[in-house]
Image (cartoon, grey):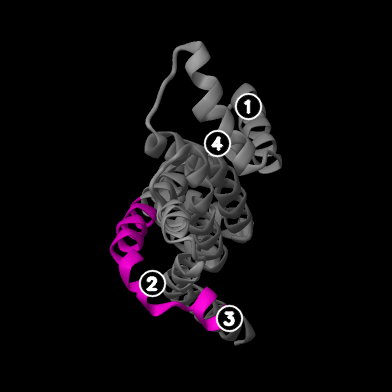
Amino acid sequence: MDIVTTFFNIDVLWQSLPRLLEGLWVTIALGALSIALGLVGGMVLALVRLYGAAPFRFLAVAYIDVFRALPVLVWLVIVYYAFPFIGIRWSPFVSACFALTTVSSAYTAEIYRAGIEAIPRGQFEAAQSIGLSAWNVMRDVVLPQAIRIVIPPLTNNSINVMKDTALASVVALPDLLKQATQSQALAANPTPLIGAAILYLLLLLPLVRLVARFESRYSKREAR
């Protein structure tokens, strides 16, 4: 068999396409939900780390350090296969979403923290001098500027989360990679994996270009 028949078999790709598209929607749903929850969780962690009481700051730092050091795949296996022994049994989708969200929150928290600390201290003091409460200073003055700063790294992190959804195939979630490997087994041909790679590229390349645009825009703004 030649390389085209082996890896680019149109008949096999066409037969496996419905299964691949079904897996693609699962991947998109898992990635979008994990990203959204990670953004919210990361913001909470960042604020606790910066402004919480000492015990809560310690817990936030410990959480961030542990989950930035823990491989996603290892944590996912623990969540899905070990948690049932302590009475926590989740579906593959919920387990994968929980694992991705908890790890993503740790990275997102550090991104938010860097953005908040990049705001000049004088802006905090100026806002407080006109009578704004700490909450209003953060909501109306600091966060709008910080979020603009951290959009490129947040988008980069979102791409990583979306790519990490492929790890969910190890807990039998019928995502894009799982559907591709099953289709490969049924057809005895690796073409479905090539199809999955193409779908991943179509999904993630626009996000990659979006990051480049954000970074270019931010660099021009800094140069002024």
Quick one: quadrant of the C terminus? bottom right
Q: CA distance from mark 1 to mark 3?
A: 54 Å
Mark 4–mark 1 CB contact (< 8 Å): no
Q: Which mark is residue 171?
A: none
| Mark 4 element type | helix
The residue that disc 3 covers is: 3
Characterize the local packing of mark 3: few (<14), some (14-19) or many (20 or more) Cα atoms within 10 angstroms: few
Disc assigned to residue 13: 2
Q: Nearer the viewer, mark 1 or mark 2?
A: 2
Q: Secondary structure at mark 1?
A: helix
Mark before the other along the chain sequence, 1 or 3:
3
Residue beneath the point at 50% across and 29% down: 80
Between marks 2 and 4, how big is the CA–CA gap?
30 Å
Q: Position of residue 49 (x, y in %)?
A: 60, 37
Sequence-wise first label, 3 or 4: 3
Query: In the rendered structure, which amino acid carries the disc numbered 4?
Result: Leu
* Image: 86 above or below 133: above
Q: Which residues are magenta?
A: 1-29
Local SS, label 3: helix
Which residue is labeled 4 in the image? 76
Amino acid type, label 2 = Leu
Q: Seen in the image, is 98 located left or right of residue 51?
A: left
What is the x, y in percent for residue 163? 52, 58
- Label annotation for residue 59: 1
Tag 2–tag 4 contact (CB < 8 Å): no
Q: CA distance from mark 3 to mark 4?
A: 35 Å
How many numbered marks appear? 4
